[in-house]
Amino acid sequence: MSNQIIVIVEHLKGNIEDISFEMLGKGKEIAGNIGGELVALLMGSGVDGMAGQLGIADNIIYVDDANLEEYNPQAYCKTVAAVVGDKQPKMVMIGNTSMGMDIAGGVSVDQNMPFIAYVSGISTDGSTVTSSLYGGKMDVDSSPSADGFIVSIIAGSFPADAGRSEGSPAVEKVAAPDLSGLSVQFKQLIEPEGGDVDITQQEVLISVGRGIQSDENLPMAEELAVKLGGAISCSRPIVDSKWLAKTRQVGKSGLKVKPKLYLALGISGAPEHIEGMKDADLIIAVNTDPNAPIFDYAHYGIVQDLFDFIPALSDKL
Ligand SMILES: Cc1cc2nc3c(=O)[nH]c(=O)nc-3n(C[C@H](O)[C@H](O)[C@H](O)COP(=O)(O)OP(=O)(O)OC[C@H]3O[C@@H](n4cnc5c(N)ncnc54)[C@H](O)[C@@H]3O)c2cc1C
């Protein structure tokens, strides 16, 4: 086994995803503490220009193949497995994303390497890994195998800025494994509705739940969001009712957010919702029910009707 930490670089339409920088920053810290080497694995076709954004890595492994031009789970899984098999790294870091979750399980089986999913923390020497169980209801610390292991990292777990660095690390070009005869073929990229704000990047989120009662009441929450310099997000019933776009949904089947302020208005605090917002710096919940579970997670709880709370706060602002 080598002392390498390999980060799988995720990119879409020419942009490296933030999760890659999160992992590179954390990987660099661990590599520094164990005298290891941080390696970025970049796969695609004609994307070698991205290497300049991966300056934090000690080394880049670049695999260029026409079959890797668009994301294909089978092709990417085979390629990662081939590189991992060759390099025998200490740790492989993959995003806990749609793409990462596709790849990680396959590589784990192929390489007989333990895989810890839903990871939100790793100790500075990589010896303890914290991951979520039961849809975020419980965190568990594991001591991973000394013979090498795979982790998939939940987006927002580490600062992305720590992994951003321009530079020109050494690039090792590696040929793709045999990718002929793939049974999975890329057909079409279906993009989400464009033009909406990215709630994962907002510092202030005003989040509404079923307590808002009707889409006619949304403007008062939106007005509050504007006054506080933030954006509006919501629980799932609001999206199911088509009052807000899916891009605004926080939670298990929505997005994981980590704003400085999360103001929850009329949200009960179901586990599926909590999973998406429990890491916010400051959580303030407004709910008429003093026993609402959201109060177990809120730093400040206000037992009040949101239709009294919103105008009162708006007036103050
Ligand atoms: C597989 C799966 C995935 C899911 N994924 C998600 C997800 O990603 N995100 C998500 O949010 N949910 C998700 N859910 C749904 C989740 O279980 C809950 O049903 C949902 O979060 C409840 O939303 P809510 O809190 O807005 O509504 P409710 O649970 O109905 O709560 C409404 C709250 O508003 C309060 N209230 C009512 N009127 C007022 C008022 N005037 N002023 C103040 N408070 C008031 C009530 O006391 C209550 O606590 C998922 C469920 C499943 C099974």
Image: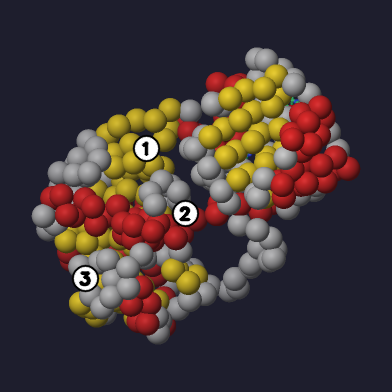
Rendered image: mark on residue 206? none
At x 21% / y 70%, what residue is drawn?
Answer: 59
Sequence-earlier tag: 1 or 3: 3
| Secondary element at image label 1 | strand
Q: Nearer the viewer, residue 36 or 101?
A: 36
- Amino acid type at mark 2: Thr
Sequence-earlier tag: 1 or 2: 2
At x 67% / y 22%, what residue is drawn?
Answer: 302
Rendered image: mark on residue 131? 1
Q: In the rendered view, does 268 fall on the left or right side of 95?
A: right
The quarter of the rendering in which ligand 1 is drawn is top right
Mark 2 lies on residue: 97
Q: Residue 65, position in %: x, y?
A: 37, 81
Sequence-earlier tag: 2 or 3: 3
Quadrant where the image shows the C terminus: top right
**CB contact under 8 Å: marks 2 and 3:** no
Residue sitting farthest toward the top: 291
At x 41% / y 46%, what residue is drawn?
Answer: 157
| Secondary element at image label 3 | strand
**Residue 92 higher or lower than 206, as above or below:** below
At x 70% / y 19%, what residue is drawn?
Answer: 303
Q: Residue 139, position in %: x, y?
A: 39, 30
Mark 3 lies on residue: 59
